[in-house]
Amino acid sequence: MSTPAPIAPASAPVCGHTACTTAAVAHWTRRLTAVELAAIPIEQHNTGMQLMVYACGPHAITLDLAARIHQPGCSGPNAASLPTCDCTPELPATDTAPVTTTLATGWQIGP
């Protein structure tokens, strides 16, 4: 019986900054450019398509900016604009609906 070949681990994302190959420790999303969108088959298009952007610690943008969706032309991570970026990211969606939870019989919230 032969021994199966080991499964190679998935490669970890690396920093997207030019010439930096350090492992990524932060990520955020941006909208696709027209060129990137054109490379995707039309039947797979949707209005919410986003691309993950990765950065190492020194090339990461701020946490509050990383929580937002960036414009297609955002050049982050870009050393010239760090710790910010060169676009105006979309504000996070606000959920105004109240959150309700149904607990199991006998369960209660609080002490």
Image (spheres, rainbow, N blue to C red):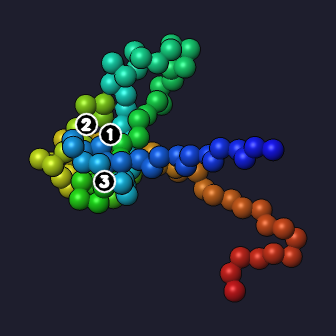
**Amino acid type at image mark 1:** His
- Which of pointers 2 and 3 indicates the residue nearer the eye? 3
CA gap, disc 2 and disc 3: 21 Å
> Which residue is denoted by mark 3 in the rendering?
22
Residue at left offset 86%, top offset 76%: 106
**Amino acid type at image mark 2:** Cys
> Which residue is denoted by mark 2 in the rendering?
74
In this view, the residue farthest toward the bottom is 111
> Which residue is denoted by mark 1 in the rendering?
70
Do tag 2 and tag 1 residues touch (Cβ < 8 Å)?
Answer: yes
CA gap, disc 2 and disc 1: 6 Å
In this view, the residue farthest toward the right is 105
**Amino acid type at image mark 3:** Thr
Quarter of the picture containing the N terminus is top right
Dot 2 or dot 3: first in sequence order is: 3
2 horizontally vs 30: left or right: right
Query: Residue 72 location in percent, x, y?
Result: 31, 30
